[in-house]
Image: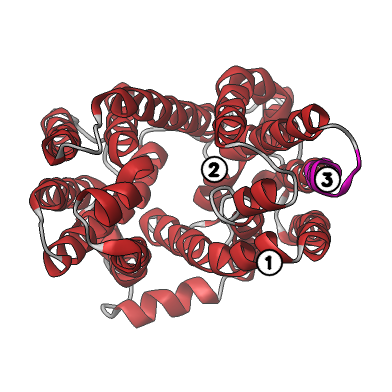
Amino acid sequence: MRRIHVGNALSAFGLGFTVPYLYVYVAQVRGLGAMTAGMVLAVFAVAALIVLPFAGRAIVRRGPLPVLLTALVTAAVGALALGLAGSAAAVLTAAGALGAGQAVMQPALATMIVDCSASETRSRAFATQFFLQNLGLGVGGLIGGHLVDTSRVSSFTLLFAIEAAMFLLLVVVMTTVRMPHAPRVGDAPRSAGGSWRQLVGNRAMVQLCVLGFVLFFACYGQFESGLAAYGVEAAGISTSAMGTALAANTAVIVVAQFLVLRFVERRRRSRVIASVGLIWAVAWGVAGYAGLGHGSQAMATAAFVSTYALFGLGEAMLSPTLGPLVADLAPEGMAGQYNSAFALVKQLALAVGPAVGGPLGASLHGAYVVTFLLFSFGITVLALRLGRRLTAVQDHPWRARNRVVARGGAAVEPVASTS
């Protein structure tokens, strides 16, 4: 588990070097224009949507470690090629390789966490993963910002080379991992379509995917698109204040992650997610004050920074909740398929979110806030409805485990329901 967490931190650290500067690199440093830079960002999303349906099946059949190693090598090749690419075709091809590798890493690492943890330690393991990912992204972005120079292509080539080196270093670390024996599905349908039909038949998982789409669409899909455009156009937020808001989001996650963990572990998962919807509704209300109120610029800036901080609090509550819930809903040996499906839902939300939120946040300020305020209340409603379909062990594992111990039995790993 320690090696897996080191892997999460290294991959996030490598991505933090390049992701914030990708648009500037393609559009300005390479001189390929805004259109090509936009296409590169789209290629990342498309590559993920293409490979994730197959990644889950590969994880189930081959195990998460071989799939992760393949993804890391692919991402390393893509990162290095991106740093050396000088034409639009080369940049788009490299971005496709990097995007595909990056997308497959997520469900592979998540499945390794599931295989190396028990139900009583899984929430803490996923919380640690999220903490290290944000820390790695923040530190990588901070160091990368001091290394880049828009007047020198070589400085960006160095960044992408460091990113590739991080992925290859992670390959070395992961080859030392000895995974515990995890069941594989030997009698599952051979076709990917058959396994997806099995997943769609799990109504609780389908409801969780719908809920996950709304969660990612209303939060992560707005951070650097609609909410940023709304802040600049409606609230008059400066670029430095935007950076402060993003830093506040990361700081709240880093500080609050383990403070809220004990609270989250002892509550029903469906109600934790429902409360996140209410917290984000407050966040959108504060954002409305920042852009639509009549206070001073200082008050508007403070409100906007608070919006990102409130989003961070909700994220800290979700990280030990969503991953373990996906694992508990998965039948034995199918965690890889379910993690890939949930990652696919996230990618869809991240692709649709900016396309919808960007233009809305830039031009229709009141409608933008009201729309996502309603989405936040929708999260609460969907979470409560999901809670009615979950078993007691799936929704409240801490209480179920303690009930077993109180009766004199041993706490055992529950078998997830597939209905």
Q: Are marks 2 and 1 in contact (CB under 8 Å)?
A: no
From the top left corner, tell me how far across and down residue 383 is, in percent. Answer: 75, 55
From the top left corner, tell me how far across and down residue 159 is, in percent. Answer: 19, 35
Q: Is residue 412 magenta?
A: no
Instruction: Quickly name the residue at label 2.
Output: 324
Extent of the magenta region: 282-294
| Prevailing SS of the magenta stretch | helix
Q: Nearer the viewer, mark 2 or mark 3?
A: 3
Q: Is residue 140 visible?
A: yes
From the top left corner, tell me how far across and down residue 282 is, in percent. Answer: 84, 42
- x 26%, y 78%: residue: 190
Q: Is residue 97 left or right of residue 247?
A: left
Q: Is residue 293 magenta?
A: yes
Q: Nearer the viewer, mark 3 or mark 1?
A: 1
- Closer to us: 44 or 264: 44
Instruction: Quickly name the residue at label 3.
Output: 278
In the picture, the disc for residue 54 is: none
Structural distance between the alpha carbons of marks 3 and 1? 22 Å
Q: Amino acid at mark 2?
A: Pro
Query: On the image, which quarter does residue 43 sit in?
Result: bottom left
Structural distance between the alpha carbons of marks 2 and 3? 22 Å
Q: Are marks 2 and 3 in contact (CB under 8 Å)?
A: no
Sequence-first tag of 2 and 3: 3
Instruction: Quickly name the residue at label 1.
Output: 360
Q: Amino acid at mark 1?
A: Leu
* 3 shown above or below 163: above
Q: Is residue 218 left or right of residue 29?
A: right
Q: Is residue 410 visible?
A: no
Within 10 angstroms of label 2, few (less than 14), some, or many (20 or more) residues? many
Dot 3 falls on a residue whose secondary structure is: helix
- Closer to us: 385 or 283: 283
